[in-house]
Image (cartoon, rainbow, N blue to C red):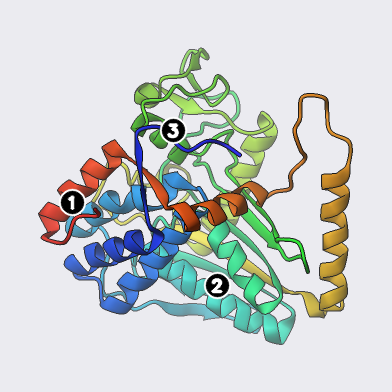
Amino acid sequence: MTSEPLESQPIPAGRLEGFAAEAFQAVGVPLGDAKTIAQLMTRIDLRGLDGHGIFRLPQYIQRIKAGGINVNPNIRIARETSSTALIDGDNSVGHLAVGEAVRVAMEKAEKCGVAWVGTNNSNHAGAASIYAMMPLERDMIGLYVAVGSANHLPPWGGIEMLLSTNPIACAIPGLEESPIVLDMATTVASYGKVKMAAERDETMPEGWMIDVKGNPLTDPKRAEEGFLLPIGGYKGYGLALIFGLLAGTLNGAAMGRDVIDFNKDQGTLTNTGQFIIALDIKAFADVEMFKRNVDGVIRTMKESPPLPAVEKIMVPGEQSDEKRKQRNRDGVPIPKSLLARLDTLAAELKIRTLV
C-alpha cells in the first residue's frame, strides 16, 4: 500500500464531512444537498482518491460564488424509456445530478434487469468509483463513465487537447471478499493526481505527461506546458474518444472543443455529461452463486504465483479498500498546504476552521 503524503495532518472523516457541508451551506446550497455532497466527497477521500475529494472544495465553492453552478437546481428526467433515461442536472453540483442518475438506473434495473441512464447539464462529480459502487447495495453491478471537466489529451499523434481523461469505473460484488472496483482514467494518470503532486511538491514519474515537443514532463507545476499520455498508446486515445461520445455527445453534453476547462473558467456552464449502467445480477444468475464465483476468481488471482520482486498480487479496488479502513481509523491525511487553503476558505465563508 502506498504511503501517506509527508507534511500532512490526519483529520477525522466526520470532521471533513461536517466542514464541507458547512461550506456548501454558506454559499446557499440547501442543507440536505450540502450533506449529500459532503458525504460523497468524504467517501472519495476515505478511499484514497485524494485529487477528487476535499481537495476540490475551494474550487467548487469558487465556482458557485461565480455563478457557474446552480445551488437550487430542478434535477429532472428529460427523456426516458422503460430501461433508459436522460437526467437534466440543471447545472447542479455534479454529485447531485449523478446521484440522481444512479437512483433512477437502479429503479429501472430492478424492473428491466439492466438500465442505462445518462446526464447532461451536470458538473464535475468527483471520483468515478463511488457511483459505480452504489448499485452494489442492491446486488447490482455498476458501470460509470464521465467526460472529464477539462481537456488534457490530444488525439493520438496530435498536440491540440481535444479530449479529457474520460474515466471509467466498474464495481462487481463478492460474497465474502470485498468487491472488485476498477476506477481508471483513460490517461496514464488523472489530472487530479497531477494537481495533488503539485500540492505536495512532488515530481511526476516519466510517462504521465510530455510537452508539445514530445519530451518527458515531470514537474507538475509546469503541467500546462504539455499534456497527459493515454493508457496503452493509441488504444487509450480510442477509449477516451468512445467514452466521450457515449457520456457526452449521446447525452447532448459537452465533448471536444465544447468542453469548458473548469480549472480556469469559473462562470461558464460546463454541461458535463456522465452515464451509469446498473445491471441486476438476478436477471442473469443466482445472486449468491455469482458472488461465490466472484470470490473464487478473486482468490485465484491473489493466490497465483507472483514475480520475485512482488510482495503480493492484488485485485482492483483492494488498495483503496485498505486505505478506507486505515483512514476510518486514523483520519484522512490533509497536506499542510491544502489545510492552509481550507482555513482561508473558512475565513471567507465565516465558518469554523477544519481544525
Disc 1 residue crowd, few under 14, some 14–19, many 20+, Cα 10 Å: many
Q: Position of residue 10 (x, y in %)?
A: 37, 47
The answer to whether one can see residue 99 in this image is yes
Q: Position of residue 248 (x, y in %)?
A: 51, 56
How far, Cα to Cα, is label 1 from label 3?
22 Å
The one nearer the camera, 344 or 81, is 344
For label 2, the residue is 102
The one nearer the camera, 352 or 32, is 352
Dot 2 falls on a residue whose secondary structure is helix
- Could you tell which of marks 3 and 2 lies nearer the N-terminus? 2
The one nearer the camera, 25 or 313, is 313
Quarter of the image holding residue 229? top right
Disc 1 or disc 3, which is closer to the eye? 1
Q: Residue at x 56, y 48 (%)?
A: 167
Please state which amino acid type lies under the numbered disc 3. Val
Kindly indicate whether the residue at mark 3 contacts the one at mark 1 (C-beta within 8 angstroms): no
In the image, 17: left or right of 229?
left
For label 3, the residue is 194
Disc 3 residue crowd, few under 14, some 14–19, many 20+, Cα 10 Å: many
How far, Cα to Cα, is label 3 from label 2?
28 Å
Disc 1 or disc 2, which is closer to the eye? 1
Establish if 342 lies above or below 116: above
For label 1, the residue is 345
Dot 3 falls on a residue whose secondary structure is helix
Q: Residue at x 60, y 28 (%)?
A: 156
- Could you tell which of marks 1 and 2 lies nearer the N-terminus? 2
Please state which amino acid type lies under the numbered disc 1. Leu
Dot 1 falls on a residue whose secondary structure is helix
In the image, 182: left or right of 335?
right
